[in-house]
Amino acid sequence: MRRAERPRPGDRETRRQGERETGRPGAGTSGHFFRTLLAVFSLLHYLSVSLSPCLLVSLSFFAVAAAQSPTPTDRLVATVNGEVITQSDLVWQLALDPNFNPAALTETDFTRALRIQIDTILLDQEARRLPGVRITEEELARMKAFFIKLFGSEVMLRRRLESVGMDADTFDRLLRRKIQTDKYISFRFRSFVIVTDEEVLDFYTSRVKPAVRERGEVAADEPSDEQRRQIVELLTLEKSDIEQLRWIQSARSRADIVPLAPYAKPREKQQ
């Protein structure tokens, strides 16, 4: 359990938008809430980014510069199985999404961020039970590289962190938790997903071929090897989404969640 005066880093989630193309023909992805949570943690895909020595030097400079920023004043928002959530947790979570303006956050933003933060903590608490999970410096550097790319440049990311008082240590802890939790998600949900040949062919026939025809192109009778690989990847994510949502709903029902801030408490139904 962490002390209220020493807040944990916040989490944020990056909304998966648009359509995923399967070998160029479009194929839509699920838009329900939990895909948003999945996107926050599903960053192992980006850990395949190769880092140049120049970028590693740049990341070191960024970490030193970010350490200059102050820590914001905290306010208790909720507790999850005794683990404290502060307002800075929510601000930091939202700040790591370039689509949000930290200077103009609304109560709706905080309510949404709190729900994601609660689910993140439940996953993190479960992930910490896995023995021997090791996070390498290379994985951490690649995760930083992902966020630099997400914000467009190192300078823009550094400015965002400084604007919300997130120092280098906090940023590192946040990224380490993301990597650890994503490894847990991969092990717990995706590893056991089975996608059959029939499901691949059905997806290709019902969703890919019509999209190809709409673009005035001729669709092959069967998917290519690359299309098949992408369809399997997409169906794996969709199936793991469902299992994760079930797990989250069950974990929420068992957890000791205490709302403290006004926007953390369920609204009463009007008569």
Image (spheres, rainbow, N blue to C red):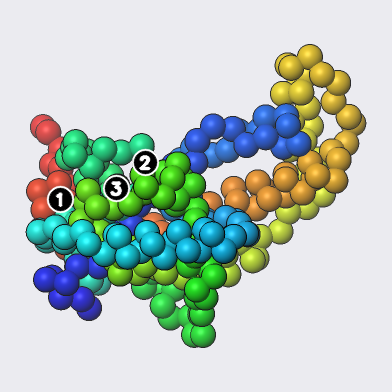
Q: Is residue 31 above or below residue 37?
A: above
Earlier residue among tags 2 and 3: 2
Give, as a three-letter code, the residue at label 3.
Arg
Pick the front one: 72 or 262: 72
Quadrant assignment for the C terminus: top left
State the mark number for residue 159.
3
Q: CA distance from mark 1 to mark 3?
A: 33 Å
* Residue underneath mark 1: 265
Give, as a three-letter code, the residue at label 1.
Lys
Which quadrant of the view contains residue 8? bottom left
Q: CA distance from mark 2 to mark 1?
A: 27 Å
Give, as a three-letter code, the residue at label 2.
Pro
Q: Taking 224 as reference, is 253 left or right?
A: left
Circle 2/circle 3 CB separation < 8 Å: no
Q: Residue at x 44, y 45 (%)?
A: 153
* Residue underneath mark 2: 98
Q: Is residue 183 above or below residue 149?
A: below
Q: Residues within 10 Å of mark 2 (few under 14, many from 20)?
A: some
Q: Please count the marks in the image.
A: 3
* Rendered location of residue 129, percent (x, y): 43, 80
Q: Residue at x 52, y 75 (%)?
A: 136
* Rendered location of residue 251, percent (x, y): 37, 64
Earlier residue among tags 1 and 3: 3
Secondary structure beneath dot 1 equals: loop
* Rendered location of residue 184, percent (x, y): 51, 69
Residue reaching furthest to the bottom: 132
Tell us which disc is closer to us: 2 or 3: 3
